[in-house]
Amino acid sequence: MNSMQTLIKQRQQIETLREKISLSTVQAKQLGQHILKSWQRSKLAEIPKERMVAPLITTSTVESNSLNQALKICEQELKHVAQQSSMVLAVGDINSTIIWTEASQQMRKAAERVHFIEGGQWREEVVGTNALALTLKTEKSSCVFSNEHYMESIHDWVCYAAPIVDPFSKQLIGVLDLSTTWDHHNSFGLLAAERCASLIQSALLNYQRQHLFIRTFGIPQVIFNGRTLVVTPRQIEILTILALCPQGLSLDSLHQALYGERKVSMGTLKAEMSQLRDLLGGMLGSRPYKLLAHIEADFLQIENALDVGFVDKALQQVNGVMLAKTESPFLCSWRNCLDSRLSEAIFNYCDVEVLLKYIARNPDAVDAMERLMELSPQVHSTQQLLQHYHN
């Protein structure tokens, strides 16, 4: 644990930086770029100064079934950590909503006062700089100390957060936060948060024993239980259709969704299904045809992120065109709907840095380019900025 004198000095330095209109290069480095950028975003969000608690919602707004199931597996270990460390431990979804929490006796009342409890909404644009939101933004572990927090009501806290990553898809699915009072700040706090996040990720492995991940953007790929399958483009289309129709499809309905009016025999489709059943080891049901494994897919993750307004997470996962060569009428129609949703989100989005990275990965994204020009009319050379993100 750091000495009290050191911690007091650190608080004083941060307060001095908070009061400045602009920071020098040395001061910005002293504070840290992630905290500085978070302060800037929080200021632009025009969060009311009188806000002292996070808003509460009744339920999480994003599907987190696998994360919830993993928490059930390891919750006793996590409760033990919170109780023994005199901290509050919280798990948030990708929308910065707390879906699970446990607090020591010392921290329980403090957590309840600011709504650092289940249902608490800790998005940066709502409550300002905090470790939970910062980790979701950067996808890296973070520590927010004392008055680095935007809300004054948590200036007495220090928070350590670590990302929770799906072991199969490698996508960020949540965040774990360990918090205590600033005078108990410890350099090992971040390691403790990362250790707890790894407990959840191990539990995810146990829960997702039969796990199917479908990648449709960029180079299409199917991963089953951690192993990349050798499949045909047609088989990837079939799996994508079934992932979008979890209730299952009859052979006729699947044929129509896949081929439309093209003259392809039912026998051809049956042969594809037989090969897929062999590859998936019984995880493909029939009458109706449906996937029985735990399913994750990039297009579903993008849709879920858009559903809860987490546009930056949606854009980060788009790399190219979804199944660019497909002729399936069902998939073409679904892709057009997703593209329309993405465009609408882009034209209401304001983060220039995220848009630049998006265009670097998707150079034909006219909508993003138009939005970028709206946001940055003074930029003398957008092409130079794009080149920076290509490199």
Image (spheres, rainbow, N blue to C red):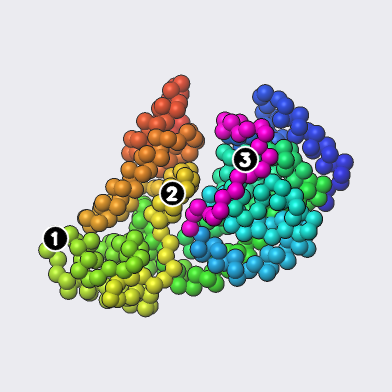
Residue at disc 2, secondary structure = helix
The disc at residue 262 is 1
Numbered range of the magenta stretch: 43-63
Q: Residue 7 occupies which quadrant of the picture?
A: top right
- Judged by depth in the image, the label closer to the viewer, 2 or 1, is 2
* Any part of residue 172 in sight: no
> At which x and y percent is residue 18?
71, 30
> At which x and y percent is residue 42?
60, 35
3D distance between C-alphas at marks 2 and 3? 21 Å
> At which x and y percent is residue 1?
83, 51
Going from N to C along the chain, the mark reached first, 1 or 3, is: 3
Q: Which residue is mark 2?
A: 307
Q: What residue is at 78 percent from the left and 51 percent from the top? A: 186
- Residue 232's place in the image compared with 28, above or below, is below
> At which x and y percent is residue 240?
33, 61
Q: What residue is at 33 percent from the left and 51 percent from the top? A: 322
3D distance between C-alphas at marks 1 and 3? 54 Å
